[in-house]
């Protein structure tokens, strides 16, 4: 049966319905569950068609930013235009932001308490197991021959020699354009090309794009002209959000580059703990930026770092939603993206190596890492339950005076 031919009468929600729904998703959804929850919401309530959501999922992989955040922005923009997208994505991020601020305060005030330390070691070890699973998946998807393997290895080696990750990405784009110019890279589902229809007259949509571009430029100008620790922090997170493709884990190498290697805001152990917090809080994984900002400049730093991380994605999504139907089959974009994704595979292996040196400090740490890898890769356990289970076990051992680290 061809479901595309079945009657589908769209329902237009009120702004309040949209905002409440996105707040609930941001409060309750974890990792890949966000994708399913978002699709169930907007398609199940007939706010968008399945085809519109599928096209949106394809679109958000063509430009930088965390995919789930981009998809949420796209869906809200399709449903309620610019204002709906702005408010809905704010409420989508708000619950995880508030939780991360609380965790950051607890960590930087009480994280050095002796009984807390073994719990953080267990968390860091489990994070390594999760990253290993994601790295293997990335390699399976994006290393499909000698050329992609070469780009991946190049990225790994360049990071070992402390070459800035942003230059590695630019080199990967160039190699992608060079290596894959003769390959057939026609997108799947090409027969489903449809015009993206956004609520509102064209003049209001044009105004939304102008506002988005103006704010984007103003943010950069302010950070460059107003020299301070806060502006450096904001510009650093803005750069990461503006150039990194994929999901939170693929953007993590650039976060490590900025927070640990370039600016020394966090130690490698603190970075690993921040990654763990990003995993156990609901909503976008890159809320780890809030943790970094809180360490640098308290509440003001947490707010600026979060805005810097997510605004580029919001801006790209607004613009791409208007022009996607015209550029989605442009082969140069797909070739450059293939080079970037191959490079990120090597960069993830570098992150594994860096975090492993710091966090895998005992045989027990290796057991935690292996257990998390097996649980998520072979038994498909939800990441949240893996972390909560590990924390519970470690806390129980400490309660009985047993330390395995």
Image: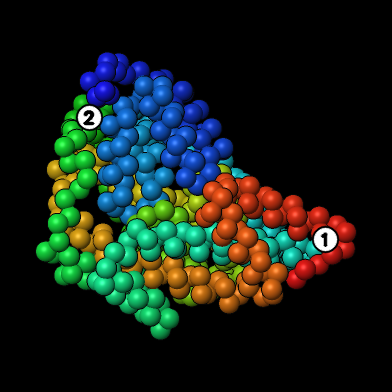
Image point (41%, 24%), residue name: 44
Tell me the number on the disc at residue 398.
Answer: 1
Query: Which is nearer the eye, 321 or 160?
Result: 160
Callout 1: SS: helix
Left or right: 390 in relation to 33: right
Left or right: 240 in relation to 29: left
Query: Which is nearer the eye, 218 or 13?
Result: 13
Dot 2 or dot 1, earlier in sequence: 2
**Figure check: 279 above or below 144:** above
Q: Quadrant of the C terminus?
A: bottom right
Tell me the number on the disc at residue 197.
Answer: 2
**Figure check: 321 above or below 62:** above
> What's the distance in space between the residues labelled 2 and 1, CA to CA?
57 Å
Residue 301 in view of the camera = no
Image point (57%, 46%), residue name: 382
Residue 130 in view of the camera = yes
Q: Position of residue 291 (x, y in %)?
A: 57, 57
Image point (31%, 72%), residue name: 149
Q: Position of residue 90 (x, y in %)?
A: 46, 39
Density class for disc 2 (Cα within 10 Å; few <14, some 14-19, many ≥20) is few
Density class for disc 1 (Cα within 10 Å; few <14, some 14-19, many ≥20) is some
């Amino acid at each position: 049966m061809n479901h595309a031919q079945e009657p589908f009468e769209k329902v237009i929600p009120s702004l309040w319905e949209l905002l409440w729904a996105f707040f609930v998703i941001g409060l309750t959804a974890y990792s890949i569950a966000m994708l399913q929850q978002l699709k169930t919401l907007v398609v199940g309530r007939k706010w968008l068609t399945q085809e519109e959501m599928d096209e949106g999922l394809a679109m958000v992989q063509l430009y930088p930013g965390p995919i789930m955040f981009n998809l949420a922005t796209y869906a809200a923009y399709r449903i309620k235009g610019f204002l709906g997208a702005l408010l809905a994505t704010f409420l989508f991020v708000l619950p995880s932001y508030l939780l991360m601020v609380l965790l950051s305060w607890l960590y930087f005030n009480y994280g050095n308490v002796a009984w807390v330390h073994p719990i953080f070691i267990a968390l860091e070890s489990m994070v390594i197991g999760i990253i290993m699973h994601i790295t293997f998946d990335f390699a399976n998807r994006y290393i499909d021959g000698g050329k992609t393997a070469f780009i991946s290895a190049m990225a790994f080696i360049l990071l070992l020699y402390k070459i800035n990750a942003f230059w590695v990405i630019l080199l990967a784009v160039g190699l992608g354009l060079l290596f894959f110019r003769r390959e057939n890279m026609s997108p799947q589902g090409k027969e489903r090309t449809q015009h993206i229809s956004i609520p509102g007259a064209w003049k209001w949509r044009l105004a939304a794009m102008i506002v988005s571009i103006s704010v984007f430029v103003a943010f950069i100008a302010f950070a460059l002209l107003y020299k301070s620790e806060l502006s450096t922090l904001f510009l650093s997170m803005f750069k990461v959000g503006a150039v990194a493709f994929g999901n939170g884990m693929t953007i993590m190498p650039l976060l490590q580059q900025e927070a640990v290697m370039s600016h020394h805001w966090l130690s490698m152990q603190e970075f690993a703990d921040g990654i763990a917090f990003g995993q156990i809080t609901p909503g976008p994984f890159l809320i780890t930026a809030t943790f970094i900002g809180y360490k640098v400049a308290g509440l003001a730093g947490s707010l600026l770092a979060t805005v810097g991380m997510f605004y580029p994605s919001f801006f790209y999504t607004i613009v791409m939603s208007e022009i996607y139907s015209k550029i989605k089959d442009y082969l140069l974009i797909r070739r450059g993206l293939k080079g970037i994704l191959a490079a990120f595979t090597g960069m993830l292996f570098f992150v594994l190596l860096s975090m492993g040196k710091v966090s895998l400090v005992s045989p027990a740490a290796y057991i935690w890492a292996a257990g998390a890898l097996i649980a998520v890769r072979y038994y498909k356990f939800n990441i949240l339950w893996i972390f909560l289970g590990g924390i519970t076990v470690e806390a129980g051992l400490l309660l009985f005076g047993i330390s395995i680290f």
